[in-house]
Image (cartoon, coloured by chain):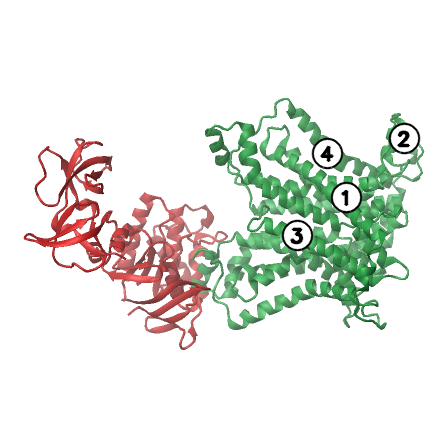
Chain colours: A green, B red
Amino acid sequence: MAGQATVAGFGTVGRAALPAALFAALGILVVLPFLTLAYASFISAAPFSGDASAWTFANYIDIWSPEMMRAIGNTLVVSLFGTAIAMTIGTLLAWLAARSDIPCRPLVHLAGMMPLFLSLIVAALCWSLLGSGRSGYLNLVFSALGLPFRINMQSLAGIVFVHGVYYVSLPFLYVHSALTLVHPDLEEAAAIHGASLRRTLTRVTFPLVKPAIVGSALLLVVLMAEEFPVPQILAGPTGIETLSIRIYNLMHEVPASEGQASAVAMVLTAFVGLLVYTQRRMLAGRDFRTVTGKGLQVRRFPLGRWRWIALGFVCLYIVIAVVLPLAALVLTALRSNLYISSLAALFDPAQLSTERLRETLASPAVADSLKNSLLAAVSTAAFGGLFYFVLSYAVYRTDVWGRRALEFLAMVPLALPALVMGLGILWTWANVPLPVYGTLAILVIAYLGRFTPQGFRAISSSMLQIHTDLEEAAMVAGASKGRAVRRIVWPLMRAGVAAAMVVLFVLALRELTASLFLYTTDTRVLSIVIYEEYENGGWSAVASLSLIYTLLLGALSLAGRRWMQVRA
Amino acid sequence: MSISIRGLRKQFGETVAVASLSLDIAEGEMRVLLGPSGCGKTTTMRCIAGLDAPTAGEIAIRGRTVFSAKDGINMPVNQRRVGMVFQSYAIWPHLTVFENVSFPLEMEGVPRAEIRQRVEDTLALVGLAGFGSRGASYLSGGQMQRVALARSLVMKPSVLLFDEPLSNLDARLRDHLRIELRELQTQFNITGVYVTHDQREALAVADKITVMRAGETLQTGAPIDIYQQPRSSQIAEFLGYTNIFAVESVASCSAGTRVRIRGGSELHVRPAGLIDGDMSVCVRPDDVSIRLSDGALATRPNCIPGTVTLASFMGTHMQYRVRAETGAVWEAISPRLSSDLRVGSAAIIEVPRDRILVLPNG
């Protein structure tokens, strides 16, 4: 029967116990932190502090200060303008890679994917080095060339710029795969019925990929609205606030305003939730990322003399997004003296040494944080791989009760800003009489909750590619449910699960925002150490660590891509 | 009885896939469930296999009750010892041909040496001797379906289920495999349930056919009986009666019974089997003869003058469409390969009285 994709033969015990266990797990990972936060926003004292408290709406009234209004305005600016830039670059790159006769097409592909390899924290740090004040490297260059203008990254414009340049991969991937999926027959049919290439593009191709464009744009607005590290690193020191920074600052005031921070967090969540809901409604029933193109012969739009201009644009993007920042990192990591007066001094070989780099790497704090990072990321990947596999199996391959609700819960973290989850998890676990708070386990719990949508999607999309007939054939042939999964489903999914685990590993390694509320001195991870060094102004350590961090992430992302290609 | 089904009902939420179905399938019989998609045939088969749990009813295989809603029995699919050949083949791509076929025996716990022997015998039987070490994903569609068949045969199942096994194959291969499949089934006296929507395939492989529609069984019988005497015009249409015309009035005359069909033509029919209510005249195209009009007025009964609107050469026969003067369009198949009858020719079609079925609608 159409639509019947579940597998029968499930014992009565499993039928009840499996969903119960999954609901419990998602409840702890996702629902509990949110409820705790909601609770904190309606009481007069800090949650679970032991102080006398009463139910109140005061928090929701007190937050509407002029600062709050400015923060809302700033959040809108950085997310809307950032989205506009990222969408323009991403869609253009996707179209150039998929449908034009641009030379060096693999390079275009690489350009679209590259921002994925660079952590946003590192990107913000690099651009801070390149364009803050008179000693920003780019400003030194402009000054040496006698140019009249300077750039200032420590501003709203700076945040918009970094958002716009580094969120390109998401629209690129969405639009590129949507373009690859447009069957060439559809375009050829338009041509046969008299449409010129240009009209085919505007009348057939573009309307077909429009959902991908609109969907990724909405997702970008969400991600940028809740983004914390980029605005904080670039503009935090200047006092510019977005909603995320506002929450963070309210928590770090003395005394902290937990109630107001929670209320602002609820406002941000409501905003983000509304956008996510709209986005999912618009894309209902489509998933542009999971289907791969069939390598069909497509007609490529001849760019004519624009070919080289287009290639120039791609190269310029690569220089801005990757080459300049990495150069800045290397220069800073290798400098013994951070005070630079002129361009000549910037490249003075006498100033270069690996001493600082070696010093940083040899420090025990760094070694500990590296160990912590790897341990947390490995645990996230291992537990996540197993958990999301079971979750996907229950949702898509069984007819147990509550499947739809489980699927919904698994996607909820998309609508929960990382800062909000971090805060919620902090208050939940700081008050549970279990030795979790203050250990690496709480970071793993935060990562597992936060990356549930990504892990669940990655694993379920590879599960959905395995026809239910394969499993049913095993059961007809005499295998029990467990044996059918072990002998047939699991071996077929191994590569898919491994790829998802690499993705989880990378995501966990990159995480900063939620970790900021949850780390202690013993459980600092690499991203935290970088952030702390930045706050203390230790730029050479920041640069050295960022360099290692980038190399690590780059290598992993490459390995991940290799895995996924094996699967395809 | 090898399979006995009583009062089977299956609902998916509000949708009723099978309303109330009872079937008895004898030992060694090949039973075809024939019907359009959505008629409940696949659901019925999945209930027999144990892949879907019925909403109500009872199913017994070889006298052993495997499902009973009343007594709360639902034997798990892996204990029912049924074989199944899937439409998608369901060949495990990560295993070799040998491993695919040996899988059911491994599950059963058969000793290794015996497994080897039985798998090789079965592979030889389906014409895949020497293919054992081949990776299953490198096979053609036909070969995959042979592996699927071997995988089911090797377990010596009490019942073998076929879910549209040939529908993903091209026409020539389909004919070829259908014959082999029927040979193997009769040779080993296997009880089979075969689901298809292709009436030609159904007629060719069945000992008995059950015609289904919208979750109900319409008629059960031997292929020849069903083909010659369908119970309603709907079944007739499904079996390839392309000339179906609603009856407007019935009258008796000296020569027997006369019916008037929509558009005004009058046809003499056998008096037997006339029913009250909505009826249609059903004629197979190969029972309609066609000739060039000689200009003289057609005076014999059941001769209808008209114009050829289609003449199509089919290799072994000619296919025609004729628009009668009354407006009705008749289809005729003629074994005489001639080029006299062209589009636009005036033609006369003749329908023998004994070949006209008058059947109730619905």
Q: Amino acid at mark 4?
A: Tyr
Residue A276 tag number: 3
Say yes or no: labels 1 and 4 on the same chain. Answer: yes
Q: Position of residue B290 (x, y in %)?
A: 15, 39
Is residue B262 visible to us here? yes
Q: Amino acid at mark 2?
A: Leu
Q: Position of residue B185 (x, y in %)?
A: 29, 58
Alpha-carbon span between mark 4 and mark 3: 29 Å
**Label 3: few (<14), some (14–19) or many (≥20) C-alpha neighbours in 10 Å:** many
Q: Provide the residue designation for mark 4.
A: A317
Alpha-carbon span between mark 1 and mark 4: 23 Å
Q: Provide the residue designation for mark 1.
A: A77
Work out which quarter of the rendered image holds the C terminus of chain B and state it. bottom left
Query: Most extreme residue toward the bottom, as rendered?
Result: B71
Alpha-carbon span between mark 3 and mark 1: 19 Å
Work out which quarter of the rendered image holds the N terminus of chain B and state it. bottom left
Q: Residue at x 77, y 71 (%)?
A: A432
Residue contact between numbered discs 1 and 2, judged by CB atoms under 8 Å: no
Quadrant for residue A238, please give it: top right
Considering the numbered disc 1 on the image, is that residue within a helix, a strand or a loop? helix
From the viewer's perspective, is A98 left or right of B99? Answer: right
